[in-house]
Image (cartoon, rainbow, N blue to C red):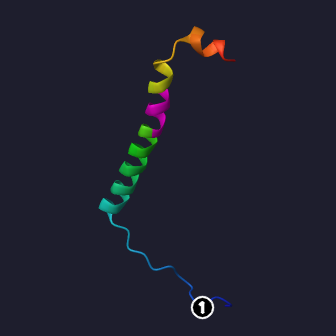
Amino acid sequence: SIYYITKLPSDPHTSDILLIGGMAFLITLLATLYPAWKASRTQPAEALRYE
């Protein structure tokens, strides 16, 4: 084999996986809610005026 390491040692814990998944979900939720909230505050006629 040309590689020095044949395996990548890892010991994933359930709590780590849940934490990473939860944080990714929270970041995604915040990243989608802010533009939606900002868009809901604009008036359609006002937004089209500057098109």
Query: Which of 27 and 1 lies nearest the eye of the viewer?
Result: 27
Q: Is residue 37 above or below residue 10?
A: above
**Residue ID at (68%, 90%):** 2
**Which quadrant: the C terminus?**
top right
Quarter residue 27 falls in: top left
**Residue ID at (45%, 80%):** 9
Q: Is residue 34 above or below residue 23?
A: above
Check the image and name the residue furthest to the left: 15
* Image position, residue 49 (x, y; %): 65, 12
* Image position, residue 22 (x, y; %): 36, 49
Check the image and name the residue furthest to the top: 45
* Image position, residue 42 (x, y; %): 50, 17
Magenta part of the chain: 31-36
**Does the magenta-highlighted stretch encompass residue 30?**
no
Residue corresponding to mark 1: 4
**Numbered disc 1: secondary structure:** loop
